[in-house]
Image: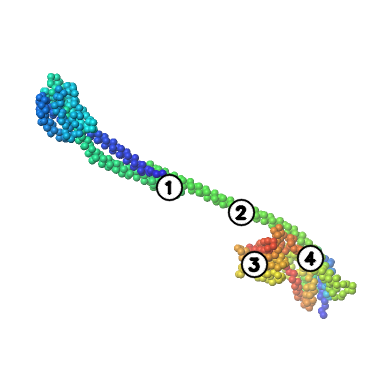
Amino acid sequence: MQDPLNILVVDDEPSIRITLAGILEDEGYNVVIAEDGYKGIAAAEKINFNIAFIDMKMPGISGIETFKEFKKISPNTIILLMTAFLDEDALDDTTKLKVQRILYKPLDLDLILKILRENQAKTSILVVNDNSSI
Amino acid sequence: MIKIGIRFKFVFFTSLLIATIGIASSWFFSTQTRSQLEEELKKRGYSLIAQLAQDGEVKDSMSVAQKAFFEEPIRRLRNLDIEQELAYWRVLLAQDDVLLEENEKWIKTEIDKIPVHNNIEDIIDPVFSIFSADNGEHFYDFVVPIYEKQTITEEEFATQIFGSEGEHNKIGEKLLGIVQIGLTPERINKKMQTILWTRSIPLGFIIVLVGIGVSYFIASGVVKPVKLLVKITDRVAAGDLTQKVEISSKDEIGLLASQFNQMTESLKQLIDEKEGVMDQLKNVNKELSSINVELVQKNEQLNDAQEQLVRTEKLAAVGTLASGISHELRNPLSAIKNAVFLLKRKLSRNVIPDTDEKVMQFLDIMDKEIDRSSKIISDLLGFTRVAKPTRFSSDINKVVNETISRVEIAENIKLSKNLQFDLPMVMIDANQIGQILINLIDNACQAMMDGGELKISTKVSESFMEIEISDSGCGISEKEVKKIFDPLFTTKASGTGLGLALCQGIIQKHNGVIDVRSQEGVGTTMFIKLPLEDKDAGSA
């Protein structure tokens, strides 16, 4: 059995942050939560995360900016951007930045857990087929 | 009404005139001839009676009053009468006794009917008179006195008759008696008759004929151009203004013709001008009509644009509201969903005592309702931000078939497809159009809960690709059909009223048209028209 994945959850909404972290912990992963981008980045400097869930729309530093900073510190981390609402400008940005996947809220948790489980061995290639692309 | 032509009138009156002149002149000449003949007869009568008066034998026989001695002078007299005009003769003695009276057998009047002169002493000179008998016969009657001694010569005698130069003296001469002779003008009459029949009448006839001929000839000269003029006038009156009278004579007819031509010409010009004006008027009228039509169209367009504007504003307002609410609701929903998810997992893993089945059941309900809320929000968001279509050249029939395969159609609904073969490819976002088709087919099926027929057809009409989806369902009322594309308008109990508004948004982004035709109780047909050529399509 491999070491459990290190997962970072960044969201300004405490209820989402807490519930998502709770589910992932329940699944057996090591989960770190951060309430904004800066804290998330700070956490990334200490811990090498395999996966990071980052909310796109946050006060202070946005999800996209956080994503950019994150890639500098930890280029191998698979970053999943979460959003409740995606405007087209933001979509263009994510396309340019080669974001692996955008997850729409409410999240399809069954699917996410299934994929995480299946891909635990090959952390570098994460495929999330949540069928929610526009 | 009988038309009497100008030619007939001319010929008739000219002939009449010529005939009148002919008759008048022949009458004049015959009168002249007659009086000349009568004068000659008169001369012959005097000449004959002068012969008798100078005849010595006559004087002798009168002196002795012997009738028999007259035979010889009478015979000579008759010999002298070459023309045989002598009708009768009478010798009257001074004692008023008729010595001799005889008449030719061929005259009808008896000698005793011819008056005897009385008072013969009064007759000094030869006397001439015309006697008309009761039976109509005329006689030139000559009387001459016979004296015992005859001293005058024949010349002197003639002088006494034709303009005497003074009375000759007869005093001292003894009057023996008078001799009376009568000449008949019958010969003259006959001659006149002959002249009439052999010369005057044929001549008159010839004159009349020649007159008719000449006047006809003249009339033709006059009438021919007039007739031509009449013919041309008829044609002009019938509307053929190109007619010209070709008369080049320099008389009044020629002048009339040239003036007529001028008149026709100016008439033609007037009519041409009038037609020109009429054409202009027609054009102006046409222009006005087309302007009117254009105005009506523009007005309609304006109304449409206004409606569209109101709609767009409404949509924008709804959009802003919807996107704000959606965003705000998604986070709490997401959190609740996460929470429920975790609770369910925990519960399913180790059943907590004192919890009944209902806890799990209620968690399921929560989960389902969260999904439903999420769906509503998705619809709202989808409607408010219809993404710019990513258009590729697509086969519309393929899109239709794929859509049908993805939709669940109830068994009591009969599907009939009528897809036109060999349709051209169209530039569309197949995902978006598919989404619309799913929406429309769903709506159709929901209208036919008790079964019916779903018809889907595709065809090319003018410069559009047409897709028709019709159902035999309950239909939509006239009042409602106008609103079906309005956002948040729905006839369904659980509808959001965003489906058709979303469809319209997508079709508009394709520069197409979506429309509806519905009749309550009969069914509803939805039409989608997508342009075959679209200038915006290339920007995909």
Q: Which residue is labeled 2 in the image?
A: B294
Q: Chain of mark 1?
A: B
As shown in the figure, which amino acid type bears the numbered disc 3? Ser
Task: Say which element carries label 1.
Answer: helix
Depth check, front residue: A59 or B28: B28
The kind of secondary structure element at disc 2 is helix
Disc 1 to disc 3, C-alpha distance: 68 Å
In this image, B158 relative to A43: left or right? Answer: left
Identify the residue shown where x is 57% and y is 52%: B287
Q: Label 2 sits on what residue type?
A: Glu
Report crowding for label 2: few under 14, some 14 to 19, many 20 or more residues within 10 A (C-alpha): few
Q: Secondary structure at mark 3?
A: strand
* Mark with earlier residue (3, 4): 4
Under mark 4, the amino acid is Ser
Above or below for B462 versus B411? above
Q: How far separated are the C-alphas under marks 3 and 4?
A: 35 Å
Is label 1 on the same chain as label 4? yes
Residues marked 2 and 1, same chain: yes
| Circle nearer the N terminus (1, 4) | 1
Which residue position holds label 3?
B457
Q: Which residue is mark 1?
A: B234
Marked residue chain, label 2: B
Identify the secondary structure beneath mark 4.
helix
What residue is drawn where x is 38% and y is 41%? B252
Position of A43 with respect to B540 (left or right) is right
What is the C-alpha distance between the residues marked 3 and 2?
A: 34 Å
Q: Could you confirm whether marks 3 and 4 are on the same chain?
A: yes
Which numbered disc flags the more N-terminal residue, 2 or 1?
A: 1
